[in-house]
Image (spheres, rainbow, N blue to C red):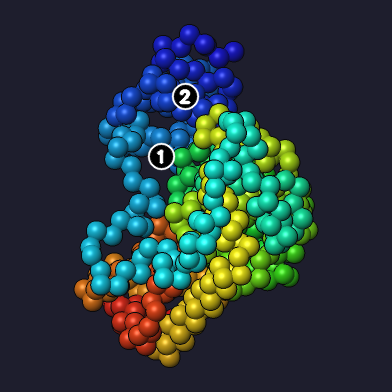
Amino acid sequence: MINKDAELGWSPEEPTARGVANAVSRAIRDGVLQPGEKLPPIRTVAAQFKLSPTTVSAGWSLLARSGSIQTNGRRGTTVTEFRQQQGRYRRAMDRRGMFAQDLSTGVPDPRLLPDLGSALNTLTTAATPGGYLDDPDVPELIEVLRKDWPYTPEEMTITDGAMDALELVTRSLVRFGDRVVVEHPTFPLLIDQLETAGAEIIGVPVDERGMQPEPLAEALRTPATAVLIQPRAHNPTGASMTADRAKELARIIDEAGTLVIEDDSAGSVASSKAISLGQWIPEQTVHVRSFSKSHGPDLRLAAMSGPARIIGDIISRRQLGQGWSSRLLQRILLALLSEDRALRQVAHARDEYQRRREAVVSELAARGIQVHSSDGINIWVPVADESAAIVRLASQGIGVTPGAPFSVLPETRGHIRVTVGAAADSHAELAEMIASAAMTGGWNGGR
């Protein structure tokens, strides 16, 4: 029996590694343990709670992976100074220089976003809700979305963008120490969210057709809470799943009995057709579609579908906080998804992004740099030395994003992510500078 009156000020509720990690995590959250405070030696904790040192050590490992504690040699193990933490997303996007051509942002070209004039004219005071307990979603918007969804979902809701949707799912389903399978590479902010939740992150490589089936099957030999994938216009590689690959992944995930969470971040400006594992395993699929790249980042809207039990729980949790995504913004999106002019503008943006990407990729190939990118506004460029490539391009007035924050598994070579969707012209000149930067520091081929 674990001593509930422990002198340490905290005690695990169960004699497991996760129990130890949960207890320390609670103590940090409640202020019992302060940032910078030194934790007792593993053997001391083990003796205090009559646990094996191996169990305590495993608990320490879970806490270290989540960033809650850190080991500093002779200083021992201490509670992390949270003000010193810097997430992957901030490291990826923290480009302090002013660039003549900033291709590091991953955001759409504002000149290719649809005109809001007509949509704003549709708004009236009738759009104002009558009370705080009204339906959180505009029914007409949900109806339009269902007609264009890649499978028939059980339930749908609107959130404040894709990352809000993913954070809501994570908060609802992922517990401290849960295994979550993600793509390698993947979006840094997603990794930050999972690490904050204390998840054990398992990386599975991506090729030109999406997440690779064999490594996924191997990863799921040990139970996992969820698998997170980007079905098309993968950020950062630009990969899009084929139907055959999606069907194979669905079979593997179905056999494992886990949940798949899909982040369709490019949405309507992806050149590939919308696809979802929900076509085969709807009861195990949560699908998120963002409208930031297609209709504007400041709309802050995404749609999410999934089993009624999951979506219902998320809607209930939101009622304790923000309640709903602005119905005024939802009605603007509804107008943009319904008006012929806005639809033509989004289609033009999709075609233009494809033209820009293909132009840069072909010019890079002519210079010996092979970029396997088929969709979206970003390309994933292999480089001999990330830092050298970034500095060289910066000296030429071009900002790009380092690849390291996107990586989940160890890499044998560096990459940079280039938002070519922001490059309207001069693609040959741009490719020449990228190719030269990619070879800075030595080069052994683009394969």
Instruction: Give the left or right position of residue 241, taking residue 236 as reference.
Output: right
Crowd class of label 2 (few under 14; some 14 to 19; many from 20; radius 10 Å): some
Residue 119 in sight from this viewpoint: yes
Q: Quadrant of residue 289?
A: bottom right
Query: For this rendering, which residue is in front, 385 or 160?
Result: 160
Query: Measuring 60% from the left and 33% from the top, which residue is drawn there?
Result: 130
Quarter placement of the N terminus:
top right
Label drawn at residue 354: none
Residue 308, how many percent across, how many down? 73, 41
Image x and y of residue 223, in percent: 67, 44
The residue nearer to you, when weighing 403 against 127, is 127
Residue shown at the point (55%, 67%) measured from the top left = 342
Task: Name the residue rendered at 67%, 41% in the picture.
Answer: 311
Mark 2: secondary structure: helix
Question: Mark 2 = which residue?
Answer: 26
Instruction: Pick whichever, 28 or 318, lies toward us.
Output: 318
**Mark 2 is on which residue type?**
Arg
Which label was assigned to residue 67? 1
Q: CA distance from mark 1 to mark 2?
A: 14 Å
